[in-house]
Amino acid sequence: MRSVDSLLDAVPEGAKIVCIELVEGAVALPEFEHPENAFYVFGPEDGSLEQAVVDRADAVVYIPTIGCMNLAATVNVLLYDRMAKSYQQQANNPLDQGDQLIRQSRDTNNLLQVK
């Protein structure tokens, strides 16, 4: 993509544009409710998103840290937050599903247990 127009043209119909940027006025990630159909746009490591992209956003979110994170870390934190919040919505107490999730995630050689 070489322009803001190209980026905005790539947004799927019905998707909500969510910009992830360290900017005043943005919503802190712990307070943010992810839309079901989100199109995430991340700011570059060496600058900021263009104002035209932020102007079209349905939400602008920041990750509360001291300083900034690199792009890969930012993507990981955001997607983990989305996944964690989706588990919370699926169950009244997500901790009840913890052991089940662990069994599904670990490999068969991991037999470690907490006593």
Image (cartoon, helix red, strand yellow):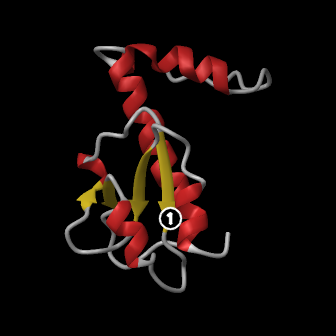
- Placement of the N terminus among the 4 image quadrants: bottom right
Asked if 76 appears above or below 101 in the picture, the reply is below
Q: Which of 27 and 108 lies nearest the eye of the viewer?
A: 27
Identified at 23% across, 47% down, the residue is 31
Could you say where residue 48 lies in the image, as x and y percent from the top left? 45, 80
Q: Residue furthest bottom?
A: 46
Q: Quadrant of residue 85?
A: top left
Identified at 36% across, 58% down, the residue is 57
Q: How many numbered tags mark residues here?
A: 1
Could you say where residue 108 lies in the image, as x and y percent from the top left? 78, 20
Q: Which residue is mark 1?
A: 42
Could you say where residue 113 lies in the image, as x and y percent from the top left? 58, 22
Could you say where residue 67 lies in the image, as x and y percent from the top left? 37, 79
Asked if 81 appears above or below 27 in the picture, the reply is above
Q: Quadrant of residue 73?
A: bottom right
Report whether 45 appears left or right of 56: right
Report whether 38 appears left or right of 103: left
Report whether 16 appears left or right of 74: left
Please name the amino acid that badge 1 sits on: Phe
Q: Which of 109 and 5 lies nearest the eye of the viewer?
A: 5
Identified at 51% across, 46% down, the residue is 79
Q: Which of 52 and 62 lies nearest the eye of the viewer?
A: 52
> Pointer 1: residues within 10 angstroms few (<14), some, or many (20+)?
some
Element under label 1? strand
Asked if 68 appears above or below 31 in the picture, the reply is below
Q: Quadrant of residue 44?
A: bottom right
Asked if 96 appears above or below 58 in the picture, the reply is above
Q: Residue furthest right?
A: 109
